Amino acid sequence: MWVLALRGRTLRQRAGIGAATGLVWFSSSLYWLSDFAVAGYLAVTVVETALLVAVACAVPGSTPGRPWHGWWAVPALLMLLDAAQTAFPFSGFPLPALVLSQLDGPFADAAPVGGSLLVTGLAAAAGAGLAATITATGRQRVVVLAATLAGSVAIPPVGAAVAAATTTATGRLDTAIVQGGGPRGLRAVFTDPQDTTDRHLAVARDITASPDLVLFPENVITSRGPVTGGPKDRAVAELARRLAAPVIAGVTETQGSGFRNAALLWDARGQQTGRYEKEHRVPFGEYIPGRALLEKITDLTALVPRDAIVGDGTAALDVAGRRLGVVISYEVLFADRVREAVRAGGELVLVPTNASSYVTDEVPSIEVAAARLRALESARSVVQAAPTGYSAVVDPDGTVRALSPLGDPALLREPVTLRTGLTPYTRLGDGPYIILAAAAVAVAWLSAARRHGRIVGSPRPAER
């Protein structure tokens, strides 16, 4: 519908359509942000709307007799919008993402080849093709419709073949995923962190036969200063020794005026042997952009009293002879973090996360959708653990094999597939598709300008 709305419009009209679409889309789909910060919600909505206005304005105007000339600019521009969202605002805020609506459609299978940009471009191209069939006539309509349907049918087997040809299964990892359960919709400052730890340790006591790995969620251990040597360190170490299995748990450690958000590894002997610290922080959730200014005009900073310290390190841990990728929570929305994990040798991807601050299932569902996309892109299993859900196991083909309930304690025990090798997308990233999309937009504009020049320069009937 958006493609049809832009068809044949002037620049001012396209800007208005982009603004109206953006305000409705972003204000509704990002409303959950208002639970954290109304100012942040409004700021992100305005910035994201401005990006969509830029997309609408960058669509070349149609020329007489050729209303669909340069149609390919629309999918190309939406690909560039996807790329822009991963970098701006706040060092990237890739929500809402068009690609997350495509995971049960045919175009998601292109993810091993070109990631979210290619999936977005193909879906938008199909939409433009279907829109063209509404206004096209005769043979043109048949050609466009046939091309759209052919692409929808051909892409799934091609994507699956690429993933199979570039990666290899190397075994399975018997994984226990611990979800402690508890109340949802509460900010961390209003909860007792010891209760969170105790709930998860209680669920972990139900683990019987030794697994290959125990995964706890993000933020299940909170410590004033380093956790090493404290009672919570000893409790996790005792669990690891009892099960003779490595344990990875999300740890929050205060440091000065900030805090560190990390995933720590205890080996089967109960020794800390690995650590990964979160790099992509959640704006208004883990840090306050412009804190010095906002502290003077709002009490928002009381909900986030400390800013997270940006981590630095490879997104992978060595676990009992296996190299496992690790990204924390919000980072699963960023393909570059998972690409780093897999390129570093990760045979699967672990995602300790925490969506317990949200009342509805919207954000937990977004995280599972993002995990599915990252699994498809990398041809890796993704294992997600959350204090109140959703905890999940996602197969390399994006299928959700196990999913916990929201709010309740849960223990998932699954054999998880390990793989090696790099898909084309993991190897190349977004760069080639950004260049391709930018070139497509440039060609569309040059073509439109050339055609417009011919029409303007055409002699009038009396002059012929």
Image (tube, rainbow, N blue to C red):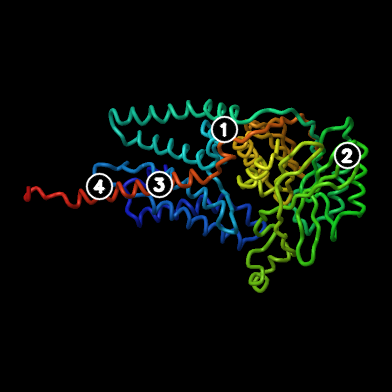
CA distance separating discs 2 and 1 = 39 Å
- Would you say residue 229 is visible in this rendering? yes
Distance Cα–Cα, label 4 vs label 3: 18 Å
Sequence-wise, the earlier of marks 2 and 1 is 1
Element under label 2? loop
Q: Nearer the viewer, mark 4 or mark 3?
A: 3
Question: Residue at point 40% right, 56% down?
Answer: 16
- Position of residue 303 measured from the top left corner of the image (x, y, whole percent): 73, 62
Tag 1–tag 4 contact (CB < 8 Å): no
Residue on which disc 4 sits: 451
Tell me the residue that label 1 is attached to: 104
Dot 3 amino acid type: Ala
SS category of the residue bearing label 3: helix
* Mark carried by residue 268: 2
- Along the polypeptide, which appears first: circle 1 or circle 4? 1
Q: CA distance from mark 1 to mark 4?
A: 39 Å
Mark 4 and 2 residues: CB-CB less than 8 Å, in contact? no
Residue 390 visible in the displayed image: no
Nearer the observer, 391 or 342: 342
Query: Looking at the picture, how far across and down is residue 160, in whole percent?
Result: 57, 28
Q: Secondary structure at mark 1?
A: loop
